[in-house]
Amino acid sequence: MTSSDYLNDIKEIKNLMNKSSRFISLSGLSGIMAGIYALIGAWFARQEIGKVYGLKRGTAYVSSNEITIKLLAIAAIVIILAVVTGIILTQRKARKNGEQIFDKTAIKLLINFLIPLATGGILALIILQKGFIGLIAPITLIFYGLACVNASKFTLGHVKFLGFANIILGLVATQYVGYGLYFWAIGFGVFHIIYGGLMYVLVERTTK
């Protein structure tokens, strides 16, 4: 056997080991689309808040049940669109990689991702129920970041860097209560687009 044959064998063994221990079919395009949805949702949310509180200052409190419902509806639409798009694109990539989208590794990934995410979501809803929205963006960013770090050991390792970035951004956002929507747009919008783009260019296109 030549040296190139050995290298190919080592590469194949590495790929098999990754497939058995990590879910590697996450789609960079789904990250880009999630970021775009988040930016659009943030724009609509800012418009709704601006109708009541004005657009020239940050808003720490929301006292209107009507606008609270609208904000929840916008968030729900963004989440649904991101999840549906992610499932479709990930399923397509999984078929190309010969992976099952709901194998044992994917289930472990999902569980480790959802535990901190659901905890943060419930806490954010409790705070929203009290009418104080100043810490919702920091809380969701921090817990989403923790979810990414927690799940990274079952998928592509560099997902943790997206998590760390959102955790840091969330901590910074706690010092600017009332401007959380802008931090939310950066974390869930801009960061996702950058991360998804890098993942698509540096990982997915090079492995085609």
Image (cartoon, rainbow, N blue to C red):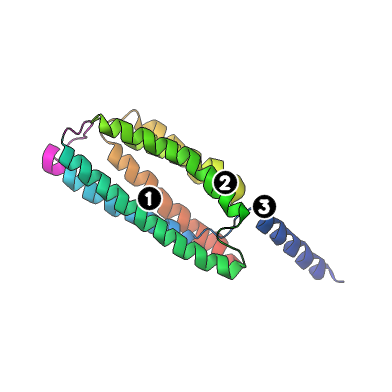
Residue in the picture at 81% in, 70% down: 5
What is the CA distance from the residue labelled 2 to the residue labelled 3?
12 Å
Identify the disc placed on residue 152: 2
Q: Residue at x 38, y 39 (%)?
A: 121
- Residue 57: horizontal and vertical position, in percent? 18, 35
* Image position of 49 (left or right of 135): left
Distance (Cα) linking label 1 and label 3: 30 Å
Check disc 1 and report the residue beneath it. 190
Say above or below: 82 vs 144: below
How far apart marks 2 and 1 lie (CA) works out to 20 Å
Question: Which quadrant of the figure has residue 149?
Answer: top right
What crowding class fits label 1: few (fewer than 14 Cα within 10 Å), some (14-19), or many (20 or more)? some
Where in the figure is residue 105, as x and y percent of width and height? 61, 52
> Label 3 crowding class (10 Å Cα cut-off): few <14, some 14-19, many 20+?
some
Q: Looking at the picture, which amino acid does disc 3 mark? A: Ser
Question: If you read the primary sequence from the N terminus, does the residue marked by circle 2 or circle 3 appear first?
Answer: 3
Q: Which residue is mark 3?
A: 21
State the extent of the magenta-drawn residues as a range: 50-63
Q: Residue at x 48, y 38 (%)?
A: 116
Say whether disc 1 or disc 3 marks the residue closer to the N-terminus. Answer: 3
Viewport quadrant of the N terminus? bottom right
User: Identity of the amino acid at label 2?
Assistant: Ser
Verify whether residue 62 appears in magenta. Answer: yes
Q: Where is residue 58 shown, x and y percent of the image?
A: 21, 35
x, y percent for residue 102? 56, 58
Instruction: Mark 2 vs mark 3: give the one in front.
Output: 3
The reply to whether residue 134 is in sight is no
- Do we see residue 122 in this rendering? yes
Kind of residue at disc 1? Val
